[in-house]
Image (tube, rainbow, N blue to C red):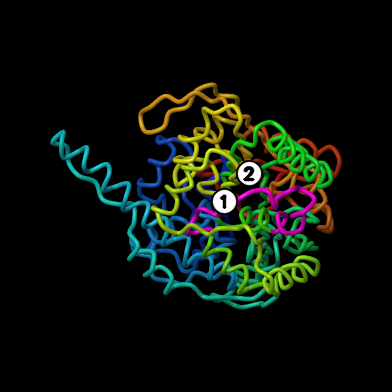
Amino acid sequence: MTIQVQFFGAAGEVTGSCHLVRVGERRILLDCGLIQGDRKAEARNREPFPFDPKSIDAVILSHAHIDHSGRIPLLIKSGYRGPVYTHRATADLCRTMLKDVGSLSEKDAEWENRKRERKGLPLIKPLFTIQDAEAAMTHFKSLDYGQQQTILPGVTLCLSDAGHILGSAIVELWLEEKAQQRKLVFSGDLGRSGMPILQDPTPIRTADLVLMESTYGDRLHRTWEQTLMELRGIFNETLANGKGNILIPAFAVGRTQEILYLFAKYYKEWGLDRWHIFLDSPMAIEATDAYARNSELFDDESLKLWRHQQEHSLLPNLHFTRTAEESMQINRLRTGAIIIAGSGMCNGGRIKQHLKHNIWRKECHVIITGYQAYGTLGRALVDGAEHIRLWGETVRVAATIHTIGGLSAHADQNGLMQWYNHFENHPPVMLVHGETQASAGLATRLRNELGAPVHVAVSGATQDLSQPIPVT
């Protein structure tokens, strides 16, 4: 009798979420995400999967962020032929996000091959193409929250709202093999209570094993009140001291929409009417449209504001810049521009061009609004780098860097503790999706305060649900 889960990604690190569940001869993959970070880390995305993609019977996707979804086209390209079960809003977002990753992969390969041709080196292929991304979408099977569905013999699935981004899901799996029954709960990425736009994470009561994220397992976020005061202070300070430009690197899905919501809600209070606001990301613009199509998932306050603002334009001074030419025109502005652009970790996208034109100017500001992985340009800025490299050029960092941890879409240590505490009898928990220090900090508190049988997942390790899990 075999009921097991094996960890192949986001174990001891944050990105590359991927876990394999075995129920007898059946194989279910939880997430299939891209590894993000420096070049060495991202090169691992080209390595063969540590399992045969043709052997997988079903994929369950917790949400659309590419560190959870980004290798699905590659999985299918490598031979997977089964369904991808996910929330309908996640499927909607993935149509944009996976296509964007395919486009970037094509451009990166083209750029690299120009250099290789000049050196007489063998050419490389894109990780996957736009066409591969479009083909992958034909495998998606959309579900609603609370909809139980038997996806394989002895495997029943239900998704609940994780409150992280639109369509993000907590995965409940009821597994049965030769009269043995187990329940596995995978948190996906958990949001924070009281977040703008989204509902709070759904409490789950029962499980035999919990796979829980631990991104911020060793720290607490600032309160919403402190965060809002901090943002207001940045805008007021910039206006008072010369009014340079403000750059906001933002994830296209989730963070961008939250920022726009806050801008609409505090438009007058923060003096935003004195700025030109640019959403300089085609993918974020499409994602914002997807949010609008799925607005019934918003919390009551956000839904009311969203519908009111849609009738009167989201923000009167908001400019959507879709083309490269429109983006380049922004860089002619020396003052008075708030520029929201990807990528959220500054590793690619249009934000790098805006950094090139503004990061060396002391009157400018950069607002970091989300998690920055090791090895990324955003992490270097957060860690106080005095110089950065952009396209082979060393650029001085003179702009003020603000790290607004209170905007995080991830639950902090208290939020994770509260969510786990809803489980009856405190079942065994495996911590995933966290750097070593973060996972260790959460593990210690779970053991000491709740007596939880807790382990930190190790890449490649297997946890057997058929046998009692030892307490540590």
Q: Which of marks 2 and 1 is nearer the N terminus?
A: 1
Q: Quadrant of residue 383?
A: top right
Badge 2 amino acid: Gly
Q: Is residue 278 magenta?
A: yes
> Horizontal and vertical percent for residue 32?
49, 56
- State the residue position of label 2: 370
Point out the stretch of residues depicted in magenta. 261-284
Residue at horizontal 71 percent and vertical 60 percent from the top = 163
Q: How many neighbours does mark 2 have within 10 angstroms: few (below 14), some (14-19), or many (20 or more)?
A: many
Q: How many neighbours does mark 1 have within 10 angstroms: few (below 14), some (14-19), or many (20 or more)?
A: many
Q: Quadrant of residue 400?
A: top right
In contact (CB < 8 Å): disc 2 and disc 1: yes
Q: In this view, does 420 lie to the left or right of 251?
A: right
- Can residue 30 be seen in this snapshot? no
> Horizontal and vertical percent for residue 401?
63, 31
> Horizontal and vertical percent for residue 128?
34, 56
Q: Quadrant of residue 40?
A: top left
User: 220 or 328: nearer the eye?
Assistant: 328
Residue at horizontal 67 percent and vertical 62 percent from the top = 170
* Relative vertical location of residue 272 with respect to residue 300 in this rendering, above or below: above
Badge 1 amino acid: Phe
Q: Quadrant of the C terminus?
A: top right
User: 456 or 282: nearer the eye?
Assistant: 282
Q: Is residue 305 magenta?
A: no
